[in-house]
Image (cartoon, rainbow, N blue to C red):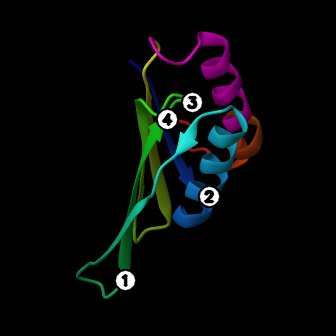
Amino acid sequence: MVQLKKTYRGLNPEMLYDEVRDLVSHRGINAAQAKLQTYSVQSGATQSRVTLPLHDADGRECGSIHVLGSAGGDARMTIDLDDQLIPSDTIQSLFADIDFMLGSYEVKW
């Protein structure tokens, strides 16, 4: 399993989810039905969470995307990909696309 973890600032969690879903699909990985949840926090703001299972061309589950938006304006994303089902060049290309498209929003620790 290969994992990518990123934190973004100033990026709406739903937009982050939409962009990553499209980049994943562009690489031939099928995005299943997403589960979107919204939570209230004490300040009265809301926090959102998106979970998206991923499948290969044969319908086998090959990973997932998790996005968590905070009331403070940060969005965190984790992508898990099964490197036994997805070729390493596809994974590397996907991660490069994510860095190119979203790198200006990324929080560098």
Disc 3 marks a residue whose amino acid type is Ala
Q: Residues within 10 Å of mark 4 (few under 14, many from 20)?
A: few
Give the foreground label among 2 and 1.
2
Can you identify the residue that label 3 sits on?
57
Q: Position of residue 45 (x, y in %)?
A: 37, 83
Can you identify the residue that label 2 sits on?
18
Magenta-highlighted residues: 84-98
Can you identify the residue that label 1 sits on?
45
Q: Nearer the viewer, residue 49 or 44?
A: 49
Rendered residue at 52%/30% (across/down): 56
Compared to residue 42, the image places residue 97 above or below, namely: above
Distance (Cα) linking label 2 and label 1: 22 Å
Give the foreground label among 2 and 4.
2
Q: Position of residue 49 (x, y in %)?
A: 37, 62
Q: Residues within 10 Å of mark 2 (few under 14, many from 20)?
A: few
Rendered residue at 55%/56% (across/down): 17
Q: Residues within 10 Å of mark 3 (few under 14, many from 20)?
A: few
Distance (Cα) linking label 2 and label 4: 24 Å
Can you identify the residue that label 4 sits on?
109
Q: Is residue 82 magenta?
A: no
Distance (Cα) linking label 2 and label 3: 20 Å
Secondary element at tag 3: loop
Whether the residues at callouts 1 and 3 have beta carbons within 8 Å, the answer is: no
**Which of the two labelled residues, at mark 1 and mark 3, occupies the earlier sequence position?**
1
Compared to residue 41, the image places residue 58 above or below, namely: above
Residue 72: quarter of image? bottom left
Disc 4 marks a residue whose amino acid type is Trp
**Which of the two labelled residues, at mark 1 and mark 4, occupies the earlier sequence position?**
1
Compared to residue 55, the image places residue 52 above or below, namely: below
Rendered residue at 23%/82% (across/down): 42
